[in-house]
Image (cartoon, rainbow, N blue to C red):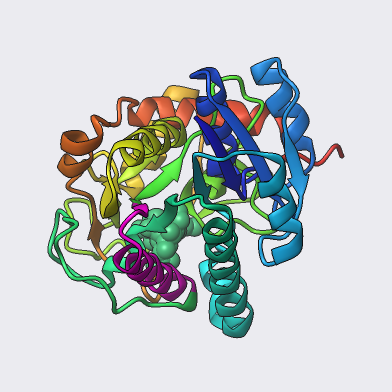
Amino acid sequence: MTILLTGGAGFIGSHTYVALTQAGHEAVIVDNFYNSSQEVISRLQTITGKAVPYYDVDVCDHHALDQVFQKHSFDAVIHFAGYKAVGESVGMPIEYYRNNLDSTLTLCEVMRERGVNRIVFSSSATVYGMTDDMPLKETMSSGGCTNPYGWTKYMIEQILRDVADANPSWAVALLRYFNPIGAHESGLIGEDPVGLPNNLMPFITQVASGKLKELNIFGNDYPTPDGTGIRDYIHVVDLAQGHLDACAYLMAHTGCEVFNLGTGVGYSVLDMVHTFERVNNVTVPFHIAPRRPGDIARCFADPSKAEKLLGWKAHKSLEDMCIDAWRWQSLNPNGYATV
Ligand code: UD1
C-alpha cells in the first residue's frame, strides 16, 4: 500500500510511519512542523534505513496538498494532522475549529478530486464525553465533550460519516484512541510536548529526570480502589499497528466504521507512578492536588470490535510503556531539540 500520513511527524504519526515502512508499505509524510520537529525525519531515516518521503505542507493549503497527490498514487490517507492540546483549545476555540475542520475538509476535497477514497481518522475516546458507563463501546452515544479539542474530533467524525454516506465508494475508519504513551524501543522517537506537559506520562518522565520537581496527582477521592483516576493506557507501537490493520481493512470494505483502540484494562495514576518507579528504578515525587476540571473517575475501552474486524489487539504491558517512555526521556532530555 502507498499511504499518506498527514501530521506524520507527530507522536503517533511517526510511530505509524515506522510500522508501515517496516511492513513493506510506502508511507509519505505531510506535516507543517507546527507542533513537531524536522529532526523526526532524520530519526525515522535512522530507524528504517531509508530516505523518508516528506513534504513541509499545511493540510489547509489546497494547492500544495494537491501537488503531493499529483506526485504519488495513494491507496489511503491516515489523517493525524491537527491541534491537540486540550487546555489550549479552551482559550483558542476559533483557531482549533478553523484548523482542525479546515484541514479535514481540504483533505477530503483533494481526495475526491484525485480519486482517493479511503481514510483513517485519528479520533479520541474524548468523544464519549463524561459518561460513567464502562467499558466504552463503539455503539454508545458520543457527544457532551468537555472542550473544543474534543468537539473537533466529534465534528470531524460526523463529517467523515456524512462523506461516506454520500459517496458509497468511500471507506472510512474512525479510530478512537484511549491514552497513548510509551515510545519506540530504539529511543529515537517519542512524545515531545511543547512547554509544561499536560498529560500524565510526559509529566512523570520529566519529574523522574529532575526537570520538574514533583507530580501533582489530580484528586485521590474518586470512586476507584486507590481514589486516583483510572485510564486505559496504550503503547504507541501497539496503536501504530492498529492503523496498518485499519488501512488493510479499508482495502476490502466500504462505508464508515468506528473502532476503539485501547487495551481494555484500566490503571490508576498511582499504579502508573509505582510501576514507573519499580521498572526504571527511579523515584517520582508527588503530592495530591485538587481534581482537574473535566476529568472523570474511570475511562477504559471495550476493544473487542477492533479484534474481531481488524484482527488487532494491544500486546504491550504497562511495564513496557514505562520502560520505553523512560528510555526516550533519558536519551532525549530535551526532546528533539539539540540543546
Ligand atoms: C486527555 C484528554 C483527551 C486526550 C488525551 C491525550 C481531557 C478530558 N482528556 O485525556 O481528550 O485525547 O489527554 O492523551 O483532557 N493526571 C494527574 N496529574 C497530571 C496529569 C494527569 O494526576 O499532571 C491524571 C489525570 O487526572 C487522569 C490521568 O492522570 O486521571 C490521565 O490524564 P491525561 O494523561 O491528561 O489524559 P486524559 O485526561 O485521560
Main secondary structure type of the part rendered in magenta = helix
Q: Position of residue 4 (x, y in %)?
A: 58, 42
Find the magenta span and give its range: 149-175
Q: Residue 221, relative to residue 236: is it above or below? A: below
Q: Position of residue 292 (x, y in %)?
A: 41, 71
| 249 or 117, nearer to the observer | 117
Q: Residue 240, relative to residue 136: is it above or below? A: above
Q: Is residue 40 left or right of residue 198?
A: right
| In magenta segment, residue 170 | yes
Residue at x 25% of width, y 57% of height: 299
Viewer can see residue 282? no
Residue at x 38% of width, y 58% of height: 124
Residue at x 17% of width, y 47% of height: 302
Residue at x 52% of width, y 63% of height: 108
Q: Residue 246, relative to residue 296: is it above or below? A: above
| 82 or 244, nearer to the observer | 244
| 294 or 288, nearer to the observer | 294
Viewport quadrant of the C terminus? top right
Within the image, what quadrant is residue 37 found in?
top right
Q: Position of residue 90 (x, y in %)?
A: 53, 80
Q: Is residue 313 left or right of residue 187?
A: left
| In magenta segment, residue 324 | no
> Which quadrant of the render holds ligand 1?
bottom left
Q: Residue furthest top?
A: 49
